[in-house]
Amino acid sequence: MTVTVRPINGNTRRTSVTVETAPSVCPHDCPSACGLVVERPAPDRIGRVRGAAMPYVEGVICAKVARYAERVHHPDRVLHPLRRIGPKGEGRFAAITWDEALDEIAERFKAAADRLGPETVWPYFYAGTMGHVQQSGINRLRRVMGWSGQLKTICSSAASAGWAAGVGAKWGVPPGEMAHSGLIVVWGANPAATQVQLMGLIKQAKTSTGAKLVVVDPYRTATAAKADLHLMPRPGTDGALACAVMHVLFRDGLADRDYLARYTDCPERLERHLHSRTPQWAAAITRLTVDEIEAFARL
């Protein structure tokens, strides 16, 4: 690896140093699953984290993961369980061992289950570091102990149920195809902060095909700043916007009826349902203008 050394006097020289690296993959809850190259300056330390030279990642990773070493080796990182020893809010804690922490938690779970039944314990959790053991291992304990069968989170579980009802399967297309698109719609997301590789694909599409970028988001985000059209509906009203857009597509003969007949069920019922969901109807709900909705639908 070649690094640049800049002495105090301002003179710059380039020198080569050898830094051990190891391949890895990002553990965060993100669909990108970026391949990583992690520097190892010492057996017990990590250094710079870079994106791997692989499709989609192309050496680019988010700022959060690029600065991973700062979190891992931060002097204020909590390394041991802490028990609160004062009233809440005072910030007074004492270090205890892992055995003490696990025993106390287990005793409290058991006491609650003995008093109110095992389903009083609800393992409310989510992805953690995304490994099968870290993410899903608790389900074995849940079943053995008879704890609540409530799904682990009310967030993605609700979205997954809605997606399954509307689409039927979690299928998508390779992200790289976005670079060949003529219209890109980012609906309720901010990839400039959360999935940076997509912004590179959006830029490619704008350059190669003249693609238009539409962002649907109540917030003025970094992604929205790049948009050709930024629609800011009232929070929770974007369903009305979607209905009005589909209304225009049917009304103006822009819907691909052959495709709908071949790959969807009940398109006629959908069209009847949308008959009254006009841009005027949606504008009153979303606080967007009729012209904005019409312009979006006709892109």
Image: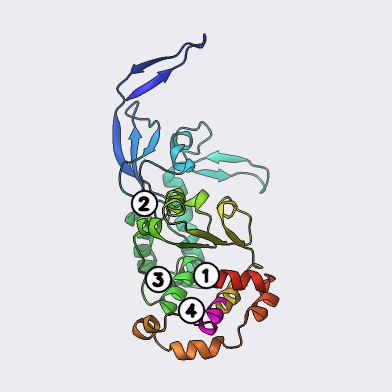
Identify the residue position indicated by label 1 in the image: 115
Q: Which residues are magenta?
A: 245-254
- Give the number of the mark in front: 2 or 3: 2
Circle 3/circle 4 CB separation < 8 Å: no
Identify the residue position indicated by label 3 in the image: 146
Picture disc at residue 248: none
Where 253 sits versus 208, above or below?
below
Amino acid tagged 1 = Arg
The residue drawn where x is 48% and y is 70% is: 159
Whether 71 is among the magenta residues is no
| Label 3: how many Cα within 10 Å (few below 14, some 14–19, many 20+) | some
- Give the number of the mark in front: 4 or 2: 4
Identify the residue position indicated by label 2 in the image: 33
Picture disc at residue 254: 4
Distance from Cα at disc 1 to Cα at disc 2: 43 Å
Amino acid tagged 4 = Leu
* Mark 2 secondary-structure assignment: loop
* Mark 1 secondary-structure assignment: helix
* Mark 4 secondary-structure assignment: loop
Amino acid tagged 2 = Ala
- Give the number of the mark in front: 3 or 4: 4
